[in-house]
Amino acid sequence: MMNEITTTVLIIGAGPTGLTLACELARKDVPFRIIEAAQQPQAGSRGKGVQPRTLEVLDDLGVVDRVLAHGRLAMPIQMTGPDGVTRDVDAVAFRDRPDIPYPASLITPEWRMEEALRERLAELGGSVEFGAALTRFDQDESTVTATIMRDGVEEVMTAHWLVGADGGHSVVRKQLGIAFDGETLESVRMIVADVSVDGLDREAWRMWRHEEGMAMLCPLPSTDLFQFQASIAPGQDAELTIQNLQAILDSRSGRSDITMTAPAWTSLWRANIRLVESYRSGRAFLAGDAAHIHSPAGGQGMNTGIQDAHNLGWKLAAVESGAPEGLLDSYEAERRPVAESVLALSNERLRRTLEEKNLPVRGDANTMQLTIGYRSGPLAVDDRDEQAPVRAGDRVPDVLGLVTTDGEWRLFDLLRGGRFTLLRFGDAVAATAPTSIRVLDVVPVAHRRSGDATDVVDGDGALASTFGVEGSALVLLRPDGYIGAISDAGDISVIESYLALVGPPTAGGASDDEVERNLHGMDVLDFEGWDSEDWDGVFADHHTDDVVVDWKGVGTTRGLQAHQAAMKDYVAQAGAFPRISEHPIRFGQGEWTCVVGVVGGATMVTVAKWRDGKIAEEYIWG
């Protein structure tokens, strides 16, 4: 039996990457489906380290508190060397840094991370469809058609976009035929297992260096288990039995008083380190382990995937709201270089672990992913010197002690919600900003304008100093927590030009008395209705033969005849024909308009995309 179900974005895979993307789309009201081949959530601890930059992403998504509640920040580390001497390692990389709200990595089982994201997704109105496996898909210029197998029954889903977040063995990547470049080294292996432990307290992460290799036991917060890790050299026994795991621990720790039992999950990792040639093919994208796979050293893989999703999510939402589709090309342009650098970092940490029998445990800004940025990417615009400490493309730094009419805040508090935000400094507060973005005017205490909700009082100048502003400036912050554009000259045209790259396009061609600009930068045409019920004439003249129309809350029609049939039903129910006025509404290819009018006493709103003077894509809110 075949059932066709339509959505906007189809997400394959419900690990941390897919769930992050689903949350991002849900809060932006973009329709999606997220499916997972497994029948139920996975149980292993897997990637247990959550880096500070990822915690910032989770903060923005509204999920960081529950992740922190089930984890431990800056877990103490004790390292015992071959000489038997144990030393404490400071796990806090950054102290007294107001620009970094999370100064150390968090330890939490990966399944806890997924649980928290699923709970947040449910709050946003979404859910994961478990036991649904992608078997194949096809795509054309406007849609992706996917065949899903669930309980032996095939379903056909059509979507505007498909995202493969389905792991290292990605079905999406394989069907796209995208090269997965890298190497597999069967001689480089590591055992990872979740075990019960007697004879060891849970106060610290213990590591032992030995000539045979490393061994580690890390208590997993909010569980009764430890994660056991051990490097396995060529010729060493890699059996995943509790007897072998215990023998490895005894030998490398030099202790006989620690007993491991009841493994809840085990895995043998092999050095399979790869990066895709391309993150996109047509209307299909790859994210997370489907695009890059790492060594466990350094805790980079899961974190990189979550940030892939955070980057892609706002761009998909923007394009669905009318931004140029070319915006989606910036996903690969920004994220693939990040994956390259992260792979190099994790490979170096793996080499030191295996060759030097020494795990570099203290994180730095690179390991914690705080230096990730997009200065050389297509969405970074500024007029600053190359040596400036803060540039477009950099991560947005946090700032404390900012005051608004609602109280005292840190900058990250004011930025939550995944929107573009414009900071206006000095005389630039007079610049007229687009109404579609959030605007914060940064003012000193002496210049505070009572009751102005957009004022942010920067009493000690920390905000201006952090962003390297002297005097007047405009700083545009992206929805994903990176700086998009900076104009130290306070030139609003720089911001407007930037927003043209990432926001809905503006249609043209109508006269001034017919058009007014709405909050999304589209042109709005008021209509009284068509002047005729000539379906094959007037109606057909204004729609392409392959027009795709999304009727909110009803469904989607494809093709002129299907749209005509649906429209006739709509007219019959409304009791009046929508009569369009004589507005010159034919515009160039790819441009959008919003048409608002009344049909049978009810407001009808449509957003239309034009091709060759006809509507090729339409969204109707009746």
Image (cartoon, rainbow, N blue to C red):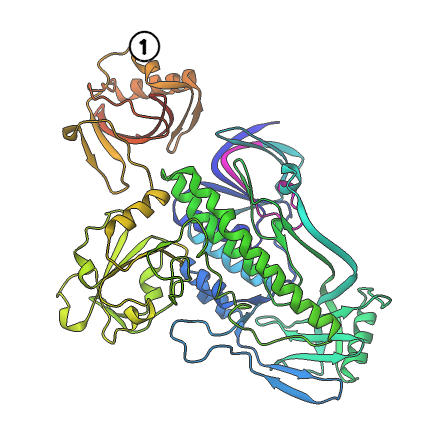
Residue underneath mark 1: 537
Asked which secondary structure carries label 1, the reply is helix
Specify the quadrant of the image occupied by residue 441. bottom left
Where is residue 352 drawn, in percent x and y? 69, 72
Q: In the image, is 95 to the left or to the right of 619? A: right
Residue drawn at the location 20% of the way across and 20% of the way down: 581
**Quick check: is 88 in the magenta stretch?**
no
Quadrant position of the N terminus in the picture: top right
Q: In the image, is 580 to the left or to the right of 280? A: left
Looking at this view, is 567 or 468 the one in front? 468
Say if residue 296 shows up in the picture: no
Where is residue 563 drawn, in percent x and y? 39, 20
Specify the quadrant of the image occupied by residue 598. top left
Q: Amino acid at mark 1?
A: Gly
Where is residue 589 drawn, in percent x and y? 36, 26
Q: Please determine whether, in this image, residue 306 is positioned above or below residue 29.
A: below
Say if residue 9 shows up in the picture: yes
Q: Please determine whether, in this image, residue 222 is positioned above or below residue 437.
A: below
Highlighted range, magenta: 156-172
Graded by Cα atoms within 10 Å as few (under 14), some (14 to 19) or many (20 or more), the crowding at tag 1 reads few
Q: Please determine whether, in this image, residue 602 is positioned above or below residue 92.
A: above
Query: How many dots with numbers?
Result: 1
Where is residue 10 drawn, in percent x and y? 52, 40
Looking at this view, is 535 or 464 the one in front? 464
